[in-house]
């Protein structure tokens, strides 16, 4: 799942492996994970400041995965 597919490096930007969703929209996140065999996340803050963004948004992704029956999570 990516916020901005234009920021993906080659060759990933041309692959049909990503979904775009606003992570502040739970319905969009759920739609993005629906039917997927795997969900990969590289979330993190843009700077060194620990602002909790990764924790909050990862929770939203996990909630959507659980709602879609994709409850497995590995770090």
Image (spheres, rainbow, N blue to C red):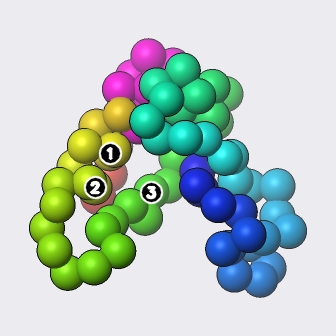
Residue 41's label in the rendered image is 3
Mark 2–mark 3 CB contact (< 8 Å): no
Q: Position of residue 53 (x, y in %)?
A: 26, 54
**Residue named by callout 2:** 54
Q: Residue furthest left?
A: 50
Would you say the magenta stretch is mainly helix, strand or loop?
A: helix
Mark 3–mark 1 CB contact (< 8 Å): yes
Between residues 27 and 67, which one lies in front from this camera angle?
27
Point out the image quarter for the C terminus: bottom left
Above or below for 22 versus 47: above
Q: Is residue 27 visible?
A: yes
Q: CA distance from mark 3 to mark 1?
A: 8 Å
In primary-sequence order, the first of circles 3 and 1 is 3
Residue at image point 28% right, 55% down: 54
Q: Which residues are magenta?
A: 61-68
Q: Position of residue 28 (x, y in %)?
A: 58, 28
Q: Is residue 38 visible?
A: no
Which is closer to the viewer, label 2 or label 3?
2
Which quadrant of the view contains residue 62?
A: top left
Residue 6's label in the rendered image is none
- Relative to 27, 11 lies left or right: right
Between residues 61 and 53, which one lies in front from this camera angle?
53
64 within the magenta span? yes
Residue 58's label in the rendered image is 1
Mark 2–mark 1 CB contact (< 8 Å): yes
7 within the magenta span? no
Circle 2 sits in a helix, a strand or a loop, which is it? helix
């Amino acid at each position: 799942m990516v916020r901005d597919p234009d920021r993906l490096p080659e060759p990933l930007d041309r692959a049909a492996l990503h979904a775009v969703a606003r992570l502040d929209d739970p319905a969009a996140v759920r739609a993005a994970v629906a039917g997927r065999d795997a969900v990969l996340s590289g979330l993190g803050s843009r700077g060194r400041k620990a602002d909790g963004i990764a924790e909050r948004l990862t929770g939203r992704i996990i909630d959507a995965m659980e709602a879609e029956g994709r409850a497995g999570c590995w770090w």
